[in-house]
Amino acid sequence: MEFIKKHILVISGMLIGALAGFLYWRFVGCVSGTCAITSNPVNSTIYGFVTGGLIFSIFKKDERKLKKAGENEISGDN
């Protein structure tokens, strides 16, 4: 449960991305079957899953930077 709380932003990005990938395949897709990603719902969903996770991970706060900033404030090094 701690893992989910810590990574909730990335997990939600993955779920939203997977849904977006599937919906893209469903409504836009590739009729001819020559497109590597959008011709297959599994490929499109996985691509959206990974892309959503990467995009949402940009907005995750870096705990190392927050910890270091807190230590600098305590020690008086500004």
Image (cartoon, rainbow, N blue to C red):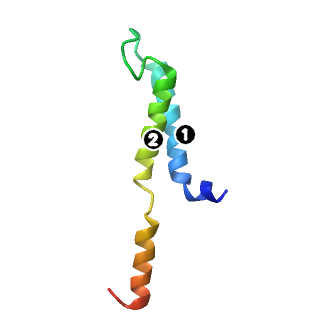
Q: Give the quadrant of the C terminus.
A: bottom left
Work out whether residue 27 or residue 45 is closer to the camera in this orientation and state it: 45
Asked where in the image residue 74 lies, by quadrant, the reply is bottom left
Residue 33 location in percent, x, y?
Answer: 40, 11
Q: Residue at x 41, y 76 (%)?
A: 68
Query: Please, is residue 52 above or below residue 9 in the view?
Result: above
Q: Residue at x 50, y 21 (%)?
A: 41
Residue 45 location in percent, x, y?
Answer: 50, 29
Residue 77 location in percent, x, y?
Answer: 34, 88
**Hey, what amino acid is under mark 1?**
Leu
Q: How crowded is mark 2: few (under 14 residues within 10 Å), some or many (20 or more)?
A: many
Query: Please, is residue 17 above or below residue 32 in the view?
Result: below
Work out whether residue 43 or residue 29 is closer to the camera in this orientation and state it: 43
Q: Give the quadrant of the N terminus.
A: bottom right
- The residue to which callout 2 is attached is 52
Labels in figure, total: 2
Query: Please, is residue 12 above or below residue 27 in the view?
Result: below
- The residue to which callout 1 is attached is 15
